[in-house]
Amino acid sequence: MNSLRETGVVLALGSGGARGMAHVGVLEVLAEVGIPIRAIVGSSIGAEIGALYAAGMNLPEMRHLVQDVDWKATLRFFLPELGKGGVVTDKRIRAFLEPYLANKNIQDLPISFAAIATDLYLGEQVVFDHGNMLDAVRASISIPGLLPPSKLQGKILADGALVNPVPFDVARNLFGGPVIAVAVHTGATPAFYPIVPTDDWKGRLEAELKQSLLQHVPQLDPWIKLWDQKNHAEPSSEWGIGEIYSRAMDVSRAELMRLREQISPPDFYIKPKVEHISMLEFYRGEEALKAGRVATEALVEKMHSLHQI
């Protein structure tokens, strides 16, 4: 019998912050319909979700992790600590990932894996297809301004989405095909989309910070306002810094995707409808997971023709 490394599909899991919880829904449906995965290449949250799966975390446990993140858990992950090079340090995220990834090397996994990061000094893509899994994922999720860059192998490394938002071309170069790409970033279509929160995230965040930290550290107040997103469907000078940053990243990612698709397109695209979920709204993981399931279920019949078992 062939090993998983010789059968099945290759997944390219894209960046998108909290929207990346949709990747878990994609993985669930592929398992349910019997489409095996022999390799995963991920950028940012795609690298994190892909690494957990490749390292052996089962899907019920992954679903539990997604469902267990409420707004308070999100707050604990991203409470500002004014770390050097970022608004927060990486100690909480590393503590979360260590039990699953710290003692595992990429080359020893039963499912092939690679993570994408960005060399900030050279402006180049860095592909981690061997070495420590935690180091690779930590480098890939280093969102500029939020998490400090990762220093590894003499390089200063940031989020893989800066150079390759959905690394389907790397997936094919490393592992062949067929390649299924999963894109969860908002992209540049529609040109301007409304932000419609399901609950008062900013209000809850502000209340929690005021209760615990703001009374002692008033300098944190601008951090709350930094990510304030207004409900505008059209361009506006009233956009907050966070919205402007998010929109700029969307435009950049869309252009990178267009260029890479011209050179090495994936065999198939899954695009969950998660544009309404903001980058740090990890407490909406259940919504993202469902969106990943719906998008994958709609394309199962076509995807079955992409692989040979």
Image: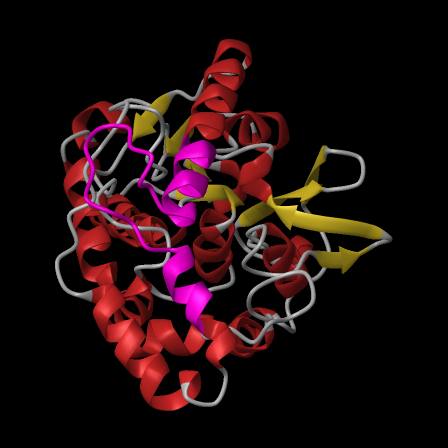
Question: Measured along the vertical axis of the image, is residue 131 above or below residue 203?
Answer: above
Q: Residue at x 22, y 28 (%)?
A: 234
Relative to 118, does residue 187 appear above or below in the rendering? above
Q: Position of residue 87 (x, y in %)?
A: 56, 65
Where is residue 55? Give x, y as percent.
51, 62
Near-viewer residue (218 or 302): 218
Q: Which residue is depicted at the point 22% across and 23% down?
A: 302
Q: Is residue 72 visible?
A: yes
Which residue does the image show at 74% across and 41% down from the upper left? 119
Q: Is residue 302 above or below residue 29?
A: above
Task: Classify residue 274 as left or right of residue 90.
Answer: left
Q: Nearer the viewer, residue 225 or 42?
A: 225
* Residue span colored magenta: 221-250
**Residue 224 falls inside the magenta stretch:** yes
- How is this picture coloured? secondary structure
Q: Is residue 69 visible?
A: no
Residue 242, magenta (yes or no): yes
Q: Find residue 179 and report its image quarter.
A: top left
Relative to 271, residue 292 above or below? below
Q: Which residue is pictured at 59% across the width and 70% down the height? A: 90
